[in-house]
Amino acid sequence: MSSKGPVQQEMESLLTAAFPDASFVLSNDSATHHGHAGDDGSGESHFSLVIEWVGFAGQNRVARQRAVNKALGDLPGQRVHALAIKATAPGEN
């Protein structure tokens, strides 16, 4: 099992602060994108996030993704090339 890099650690800290009591899994998918567009060689360019948070109830998919991107600040688009987000409220699939 590989250790988490500094970008992943920072992202997890920001998500924990922005979405109290959320459960989430942030996966580093960079190895599967090695040599593709956006691979900067850092090993931390592509991530997937699955997050469940009670605060997402009543929000549509776009609003949820905007909330996640806002919480992460300049990371998406600056140090992170791609972030796939699946954001749900409890009880949703």
Image (cartoon, grey):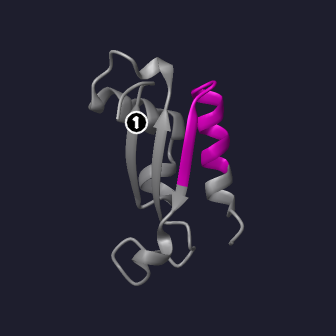
Q: Is residue 28 left or right of residue 32?
A: right
Q: Residue at label 1?
A: 87
Q: Amino acid at mark 1?
A: Ala
Can you give x and y, in whole percent of width and height, for residue 68 in the image?
Answer: 45, 35
Q: Secondary structure at mark 1?
A: strand
Please name the residue shown 49% across and 76% down the image. 31
Residue with the most extreme bottom position: 35
Asked where in the image residue 48 lies, by quadrant, the reply is bottom left
**23 falls in the magenta region:** yes
40 vs 3, nearest the viewer: 3
**3 falls in the magenta region:** no
Please name the residue shown 51% across and 50% down the image. 75
Establish if 73 lies above or below 18.
below
Which quadrant, please, contains the C terminus? top left
Please name the residue shown 69% across and 72% down the image. 1
Residue segment shown in magenta: 10-26
Can you give x and y, in whole percent of width and height, for residue 91 in the image?
Answer: 41, 25
Can you give x and y, in whole percent of width and height, for residue 92 in the image?
Answer: 36, 28
Can you give x and y, in whole percent of width and height, for residue 24 in the image?
Answer: 55, 41
Residue with the most extreme top position: 58
Establish if 45 lies above or below 63.
below
Q: How many marks?
A: 1
